Amino acid sequence: MTSVKVRDEDAAYLAKHALLSGAMEALLKARPPDVLAFLIDTLSGVEGAAQDAELQLAEWRLDKLAAVFARMDRVRAGQGLCAHGSSPSLSCSLDSAEHSVLTRARGAPQ
């Protein structure tokens, strides 16, 4: 194959899929502190891939952390009533699906 043909095929492939060109444009526009995490989020189609410059975390990750801290605050305030039969703890503020995952991760019976 000639280099011109390879280049044309590569260009056609990228144009067809538009994966990297869109990600690179977003990368150059955002100039995030954590380039790899930004590219992964962008290519995965995650909304909120923009990163906080100070914390170097994507918006969606900050939202998840805020939710975890809010649950911790509810448990500490005594509002995290445990419906799973365990003693009051962070796991008590989890819904049943999250509690099941946590229980399996700890190796405890459900």
Image (tube, rainbow, N blue to C red):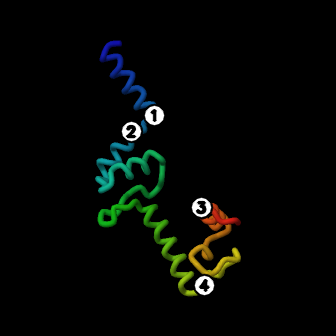
Q: CA distance from mark 3 to mark 2?
A: 36 Å
Label annotation for residue 20: 2
Q: Mark 3 near mark 4, Cβ–Cβ under 8 Å?
A: no
Q: Mark 1 near mark 4, Cβ–Cβ under 8 Å?
A: no
Image height of 1 relative to 92, above or below: above
Left or right, 9 with respect to 86, comes to: left
**Disc 1 secondary structure class:** helix
The residue singled out by tag 3 in the image is: 105
Nearer-N-terminus badge (1/3):
1
Q: Amino acid at mark 2?
A: Leu
The 10 Å Cα crowd at callout 3, few under 14, some 14 to 19, many 20 or more, is few
Q: Mark 2 near mark 1, Cβ–Cβ under 8 Å?
A: yes
The 10 Å Cα crowd at callout 1, few under 14, some 14 to 19, many 20 or more, is few
Nearer-N-terminus badge (4/2):
2
For discs 3 and 4, the disc positioned in front in the rendered view = 3
Q: Amino acid at mark 3?
A: Ala
**Disc 2 secondary structure class:** helix
Label annotation for residue 17: 1
Q: Mark 1 near mark 3, Cβ–Cβ under 8 Å?
A: no
Q: CA distance from mark 3 to mark 4?
A: 25 Å
The residue singled out by tag 4 in the image is: 79
For discs 3 and 2, the disc positioned in front in the rendered view = 3
**Disc 4 secondary structure class:** loop
* Image point (43%, 66%), residue name: 62
Across and down, in percent, residue 93 comes to 60, 75
Q: Mark 3 near mark 2, Cβ–Cβ under 8 Å?
A: no
Q: Amino acid at mark 1?
A: His
Across and down, in percent, residue 13 comes to 42, 28
Query: As drawn, which residue projects farthest toward the bottom?
Result: 77
Q: CA distance from mark 2 to mark 1?
A: 8 Å
Across and down, in percent, residue 90 comes to 56, 76
